[in-house]
Image (cartoon, grey):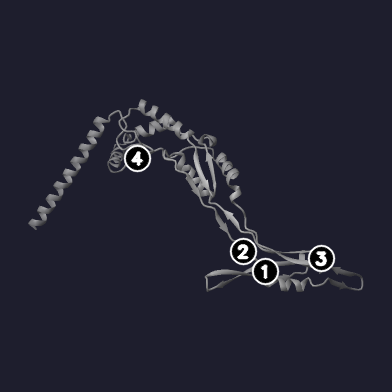
């Protein structure tokens, strides 16, 4: 029991020493930086501590101008595309930002101020947290410069012209992650270290491929082998092979090939009689 009591006393002493050290540091904070930005506060990578509000405002103006004028480089395939932040009306409110940075650790609520000051001892605080820009102009920039890297895939299909049935091969599509591109641009807008943004163009496979249509071609040829004659007491109607072909619809069905864990698409053809004939 005596050992436990002594251990508890030691813990209390250590805690009191730690608290004393923390409050001593905070006291120095408030004494030395009474009218200046607290330590461990940055604009991007630039340290701001020790500046009064007037000097802070001057520094922020220079930093904001630099961010506004320095282009953001985007690399996609073999192209380099440049975005000037001012072209999308990028802005940072210098007055608001100056007030926000200077006020950090000086909240009207004493407990909040204490929490913020303790945070500065543990980790740095970086500003700005966000920026403002014209989202419509950014969307237009992305559309104008990156639409060529987005293409819907085209399924393989049949063509029937002048009595000849042909398979039109599939076309592979491509796509980029525009949401990720927007996110990366937003990060770069408030970053002083503007490394080029690298965008990957991904391929998109069509669902129906030529190999799948080869199976259906035999059935299609049976359907359109010859015209259809409809006879009755009141009329004689000849339905052309082109018309018959226009009634055919193709549906994809997935069959897994276990050997290479891929999927092959077989295609079924069905014959539907239009309402105009019924």
Q: On screen, 229 above or below 83? A: below
Which mark's residue is nearer the viewer, 2 or 3? 2
Q: CA distance from mark 2 to mark 3?
A: 32 Å
Q: Residues within 10 Å of mark 2 (few under 14, many from 20)?
A: some
Q: Which residue is mark 1?
A: 213
Q: Which residue is mark 3?
A: 276
Q: Position of residue 268 (x, y in %)?
A: 67, 71
Q: Position of residue 50 (x, y in %)?
A: 30, 30
**Are the residues tagged 2 and 4 within 8 Å (C-beta)?**
no
Sooner in the amino-acid sequence: mark 2 or mark 4: 4
Which mark's residue is nearer the viewer, 1 or 2? 1
Sooner in the amino-acid sequence: mark 4 or mark 1: 4
Q: CA distance from mark 2 to mark 4?
A: 50 Å
Left-right relation of 245 to 187: right
Residue 125: mark: 4
Element type at marker 2?
loop
Q: Residues within 10 Å of mark 3 (few under 14, many from 20)?
A: few
Sooner in the amino-acid sequence: mark 2 or mark 3: 2
Q: CA distance from mark 1 to mark 2?
A: 11 Å
Quadrant where the image shows the N terminus: bottom left
Element type at marker 4?
strand
Q: Given the current orientation, which residue lies at the most extreme top position?
A: 54
Q: Nearer the viewer, residue 252 or 161?
A: 161
Q: Position of residue 162 (x, y in %)?
A: 81, 64
Q: Residues within 10 Å of mark 4 (few under 14, many from 20)?
A: some
Q: Kindly identify the residue that appears in the image at 81 percent across and 68 percent down.
A: 241
Q: Residues within 10 Å of mark 1 (few under 14, many from 20)?
A: many
Q: CA distance from mark 4 to mark 3?
A: 74 Å
Q: Which residue is mark 2?
A: 207
Q: Kindly identify the residue that appears in the image at 34 percent across and 40 percent down.
A: 125
Which quadrant of the view contains residue 117? top left
**Are the residues tagged 1 and 2 within 8 Å (C-beta)?**
no
């Amino acid at each position: 029991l005596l050992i436990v009591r002594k251990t508890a006393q030691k813990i209390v002493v250590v805690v009191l020493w730690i608290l004393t050290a923390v409050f001593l540091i905070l006291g120095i904070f408030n004494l030395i930086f009474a009218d200046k930005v607290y330590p461990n506060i940055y604009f991007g990578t630039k340290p701001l501590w020790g500046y009064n509000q007037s000097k802070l405002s001057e520094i922020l103006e220079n930093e904001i101008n630099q961010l506004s004028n320095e282009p953001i480089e985007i690399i996609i395939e073999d192209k380099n595309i440049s975005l000037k932040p001012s072209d999308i009306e990028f802005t940072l409110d210098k007055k608001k930002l100056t007030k926000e940075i200077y006020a950090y650790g000086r909240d009207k609520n004493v407990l909040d101020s204490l929490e913020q000051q303790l945070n500065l001892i543990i980790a740095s605080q970086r500003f700005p947290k966000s920026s403002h820009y014209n989202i419509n102009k950014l969307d237009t920039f992305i559309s104008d410069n990156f639409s060529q890297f987005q293409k819907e895939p085209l399924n393989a299909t049949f063509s029937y012209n002048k009595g000849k049935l042909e398979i039109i091969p599939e076309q592979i599509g491509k796509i980029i992650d525009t949401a990720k591109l927007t996110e990366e641009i937003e990060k770069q807008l408030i970053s002083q270290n503007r490394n080029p943004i690298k965008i990957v163009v991904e391929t998109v496979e069509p669902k129906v491929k030529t190999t799948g249509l080869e199976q259906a071609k035999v059935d299609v040829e049976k359907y359109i082998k010859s015209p259809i004659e409809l006879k009755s007491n009141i009329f004689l109607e000849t339905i052309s092979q082109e018309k018959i072909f226009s009634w055919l619809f193709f549906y994809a069905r997935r069959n897994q090939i276990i050997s290479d864990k891929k999927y092959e698409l077989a295609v079924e053809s069905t014959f539907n009689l239009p309402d105009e004939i019924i």
